[in-house]
Image: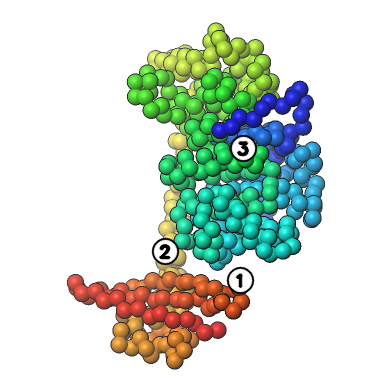
Amino acid sequence: MHRAAPPDGGGATPILETRDLKVYFPVKRGLIIQRTVGVVKAVDGVDIQIQAGETLGLVGESGSGKTTLGRAILRLSDASGGSVRYEGEDVLALRGRDLRLLRSKIGMVFQDPYGSLNPRMTVGNIVAEPMLVHKIFDDRSKIKDRVMELFDTVGLSRSMATRYPHEFSGGQRQRIGIARALASGPKLLICDEPVSALDVSIQAQIISLFDRLKVEQNLTYLFIAHDLSVVRHVSDTVAVMYLGKVVEQGDADAIYRDPQHPYTQALLSAVPIPDPVVERKRARIVLRGDMPSPLNPPTGCVFNTRCPLAEERCFVETPLPRTFPDGRRIACHVVSPQFDSVASAESTAQLMARSLESSEERVAAGGGPLKKAAFGQLSADSSARQARPMITGRRLAMIVGAVFLGVLLSMFLFEFGLGAPGERSIVPAAVIESRIDEFIDGQGCVREDAVVQLDISNVEYARVVYLRDNPSRPGSYLPPRIEYRYYYAEGTIEAIPEITGDFCY
């Protein structure tokens, strides 16, 4: 990946900056009168900076708040506090036309290439939509030319513009999503795990595309991912998130060469190395337990329940990010800001390994006080929680009763034809092949009275819906083409008659 040049003088205004950004989601209970019983702290006081032309890689476990942070920058999720500045402008204060103008400068590539495209629109219309929304061109011919240009840019054939999303592979759909993100001419792209749903071979192609676009169009990326090898390739700087907080941020090469925060150490130790000899010899740091719930995060450092270096103050004081000699920022009480990243007398990795060994030895010996780590003083509380019955007799009775009532309700709905559409009330329960013509009128349309005619319990069917363009009105559709396929199974004989036609509205 092309590396951006360092900012001149260190005082350049970042293209994107967040300060103490918070995104909280209230948890409410009650059917009629709802009351707030807590908040989920998805993003909790995040500070990041991205210089123009750089790529910031945002990594962390699932549930750490990476996607929510990206959505909050675009105002797709409401921020609860803090500030977001794009080119010095307060994003959270924008409204109406100003907010739309901002969104034309920031594009977003979504994680799911299957769910992020409208199945009722051709891919040409999908790519053209941002230009129509932001009124970039007045002439539709210019919009069409721009769409064709974007198809060339992302490596798609121009003839594909009239097709629908279901006709493309996952990699092609992601290219369509990238073309849509580029349609309004943004300077910043927020890429929310753009390759995690793709095959490895396709991932390499998409990463190469991002690399080329960054150089050709001078783009800036916020690259969200959980694949650390991908992040290392694309990023100039890296920010590591855990439970809504950034625990370490700095130059990508420095962090990958010498990670300092215990959580960053554990993440990088989990990345496999292709060389089996090196893989067998290197030390692995295995974190105990799962990430705590953001609804009830631990006091003090959010990582104290899993950190083998946790001290007394880690359970009381929240560590503030400190700037280290090499420019990185780390939020940790244990890591000293006076370390020498090139030749440290004792690295954090060695401290963690020795702490793990000594703690395990003391546990095995059955004596000796342990520090307040996840397997230390908290072990008594954890054991007490585990000793409590997860499901009491009363809860079990309530669960069984609810399941029983659900089964009775389903049987009642099915018996009286009130079940899900498509089972009894929309299509015939059975169609004999010789009677297919009875359900289609002279114009080839399925009659509306073609409801339940027969009732044969061993018949299954599937419904396939096709949307067709209206040649007389571009952009509109004819009534859907619907095919009903019926599968008859009697012994070893299977017949598949079909009914094909249009519902006339």
Residue 322 in view: yes
- Marks 1,2: beta carbons within 8 A: no
Q: Quadrant of the N terminus?
A: top right
Q: Position of residue 83 (x, y in %)?
A: 76, 39
Q: Is residue 23 visible?
A: no
From the image, state whether disc 3 or disc 1 is nearer to you: 3
Residue under numbered circle 3:
215
Q: Residue at x 65, y 22 (%)?
A: 328
Find the distance from the CA under tag 1 to the CA under tag 2: 49 Å
Which mark sits nearer the N-terminus, 2 or 3? 3
Read off the residue under disc 1.
475
- Indicate left or right for 49 with 239 as reference: right
The extreme left residue here reads 492
Nearest to N terminus: mark 3 or mark 1: 3
Judge whether 201 appears above or below 252 on screen. Answer: below
Relative to 396, is 16 above or below?
above
- Element at badge 3? helix
Residue that badge 2 annotates: 404
Residues 289 and 353: in front is 353
Quadrant including the C terminus: bottom right
| Tag 2: amino acid | Phe
Query: Tag 1: residue type?
Result: Gly
User: 10 Å neighbourhood of mark 3: few (<14), some, or many (≥20)?
Assistant: some
SS of the residue under disc 1: loop
Colouring mode (rainbow / by chain / secondary structure / one colour): rainbow
